[in-house]
């Protein structure tokens, strides 16, 4: 198949896509309060519990409530569950939420609220970073549809694309001038723009397999982008 010499070279060059900048998006469950399924406020016992919508505080005693474990990033950031996102609106929502739940505003509150604040703030940060970038947003949207891209998917990629990736890495390794680096960077940026447009069309057509294919290619180019950044750092 396509896992012989090429597969070995991909491993040597570090071309296995390792996720989104070396990390996977956290799920909302990871930031929720373990075992908190009660609809009641933890502080006053009134109707409260994990908050939905735009409310984060108990309407009775105004105590901060734990994060809602069923809420996804799109809902949290007040975005439609779609690949196309208004990034300006996303940034505004991020600022609004951090003004509500940032730990700095809870220094004089109970330890329970301090803990909830940390969880909320972390969740908001993760949601913002995930939805801001096209690659991480697309991978997260696929995950919500029950589709994940495993690491080490070179056997599923076409030979022409893998050759393109290897050649680009060879050029990057040989690049000694700023002009050469900029040329490679420009090519990668154009490729990512083209792939992003293809991913958007695929999601609009509910073609998850096509979206998965395009996002896999984006991960390879993202890997090159990271190498370009590292090469720019003076030793």
Image (spheres, rainbow, N blue to C red):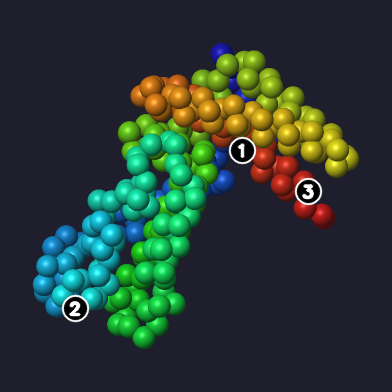
Please give the label number shown on residue 222.
1
Which image quarter is the C terminus in? bottom right
Query: Tag 2's secondary structure?
Result: loop
Q: Residue furthest right?
A: 177
Tags 3 and 2 touching, CB below 8 Å: no
Q: Position of residue 65 (x, y in %)?
A: 25, 69
Measure the alpha-carbon separation of dots 3 and 1.
16 Å
- Tell me which numbered mark, 2 or 1, is placed earlier along the sequence: 2
Residue 66 placement, left or right of 190: left
Residue at x 27% of width, y 72% of height? 64
Residue at x 59% of width, y 20% of height? 3
Residue at x 25% of width, y 51% of height? 70
Query: Tag 1's secondary structure?
Result: helix
Q: Nearer the viewer, residue 218 or 194?
A: 194
Which image quarter is the N terminus in? top right
- Residue wearing tag 3: 232
Q: Residues within 10 Å of mark 3 (few under 14, many from 20)?
A: few
Quadrant hosting residue 116: bottom left
Q: Position of residue 132 (x, y in %)?
A: 50, 47
Q: Nearer the viewer, residue 219 or 85?
A: 85
Instruction: Work out whether 235 lies above or below 185.
Output: below
Measure the alpha-carbon separation of dots 3 and 2.
53 Å
Tags 3 and 1 touching, CB below 8 Å: no
Q: Depth-wise, is mark 2 or mark 1 nearer the camera? A: 2
């Amino acid at each position: 198949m396509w896992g012989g010499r090429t597969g070995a070279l991909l491993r040597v060059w570090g071309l296995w896509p390792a996720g989104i900048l070396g990390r996977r998006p956290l799920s909302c469950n990871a930031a929720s309060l373990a075992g908190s399924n009660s609809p009641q406020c933890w502080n006053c016992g009134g109707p409260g519990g994990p908050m939905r919508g735009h409310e984060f505080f108990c309407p009775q005693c105004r105590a901060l409530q734990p994060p809602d474990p069923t809420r996804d990033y799109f809902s949290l950031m007040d975005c439609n569950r779609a690949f196309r996102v208004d990034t300006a609106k996303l940034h505004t929502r991020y600022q609004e939420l951090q003004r509500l739940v940032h730990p700095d505003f809870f220094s004089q509150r109970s330890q329970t609220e301090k803990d909830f604040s940390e969880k909320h703030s972390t969740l908001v940060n993760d949601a913002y970073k995930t939805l801001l970038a096209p690659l991480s947003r697309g991978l997260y949207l696929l995950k919500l549809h029950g589709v994940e891209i495993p690491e080490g998917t070179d056997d599923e990629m076409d030979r022409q694309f893998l050759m393109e990736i290897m050649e680009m890495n060879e050029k990057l390794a040989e690049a000694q001038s700023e002009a050469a680096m900029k040329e490679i960077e420009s090519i990668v940026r154009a490729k990512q723009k083209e792939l992003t447009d293809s991913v958007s069309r695929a999601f609009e057509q509910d073609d998850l397999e096509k979206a998965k294919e395009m996002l896999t290619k984006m991960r390879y180019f993202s890997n090159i982008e990271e190498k370009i950044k590292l090469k720019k750092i003076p030793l």
